[in-house]
Amino acid sequence: MRLIFLVNGISKTSIPWRWAEFFNWHSSQLKVKMVSIGDLTTNIADIKKSVDIVHGHHVKAMALFLVVNIFLRKKSVYTVHGSYLFLSRINTALLNYIFRYADRIIFVNKMLYDVLPLDMKHLIRDKYEIILNGVETNYSYVKRDVYKKYNLDESDTVLFHPARFVPEKNHLRMIRALKPLIEKDRRIKLVLAGDGRLKQDIEEQIGELKLEENIVMLGLIERDEVYNFLEKCDLFLMPSLSEGLNIAFLEAISMHCRVVISDIEQFVYPLQAYGLNPGDINVTFVDPLDEKAIALGIQSALKKERKRTYDCSDFSLETMMHKYESVYGGLPA
């Protein structure tokens, strides 16, 4: 089957890009091409002639395609990666359109379905499925000395946070929670890997709290560097207010990191679904709205031994890929 992964913009660090690479390398059934919304019109002839399925990952791109698909009549799948609760009015209307006209809707987490209003659930009542995200549990990454590159000392206590700078990632509260810990131990370093619209707000708060020496902002980094940080860091920190199914969180577990995450359903549910005990996989839950709870969770996690022997195969990208193969194969003719 020939597939198009349709996105707003193509990024080699994005989830769809990783899936496309993995599917092309490991699936005997699928051949995937990434197409951005800006390139959609130039690919219409190719889609009409030789593409079997268009699989959308972003609201605007998929809604535009479904308008064009009135004439193309191609099979379509849409994956919901983020919460309905954080959509703008325009994107909410577009998602309604997608739910009405896409052949199959996939949610990466049960909670993303649960928060939908009843009228939206009604639109997809016979055509939705929940497929949890997977990660490359045996990813072969290039070893690099990321501490040396980013001026971190081996004696530093490094807390790693790879995420977009958006409100739901809870950066400002996380930074405030760290201040008393840093005042007690100046070796603590928070490493932020990401970018986004809250960058200026984050920089201003770092300055106001006089934490410039202890919070390192890397910007966007390569995937191999993410894995090098996961291998070396003392703790993976993600006290989010909301999530889809956070890939970095699963990658951190697969790398046997100490993990501190919020006790929201989007983090709790995947562990329950996979039958994983948080204590067996280095996971500590905290209340994302309570700065003291975040600080105490970090302190507690850092005292625990890093367990390195548990099995991660249930949330492998290969397992996820086979579920998508079944979805594609079961689409109506």
Image (cartoon, grey):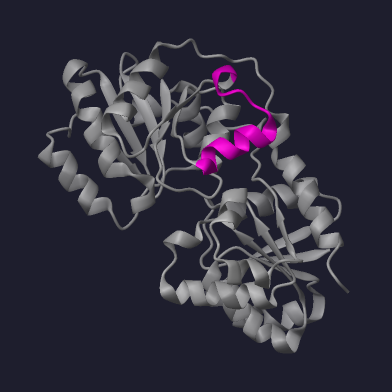
- Residue 327 higher or lower than 333, as above or below: above
Q: Image point 60% across, 78% down: which residue?
A: 97
Query: In terms of depth relative to the viewer, which is nearer, 307 or 95?
Result: 95
Quarter containing the C terminus: bottom right
Taking the view exactly as shown, the residue that stands out farthest to the bottom is: 71
Relative to residue 310, is residue 10 drawn left or right?
A: left
Residue 268 magenta-highlighted = yes
Query: At which x and y percent is residue 47?
Result: 74, 77
Residue 211 magenta-highlighted = no
Query: At which x and y percent is residue 89?
Result: 42, 74
Q: Which residues are magenta?
A: 265-280
Q: Image point 64% across, 39% down: which residue?
A: 135
Taking the view exactly as shown, the residue that stands out farthest to the front is: 118
Query: In terms of depth relative to the viewer, which is nearer, 100 or 34?
Result: 100
Query: At which x and y percent is residue 35?
Result: 62, 68
Query: At which x and y percent is residue 327?
Result: 80, 58
Query: In terms of depth relative to the viewer, which is nearer, 89 or 209?
Result: 89
- Residue 125 higher or lower than 144, as above or below: below
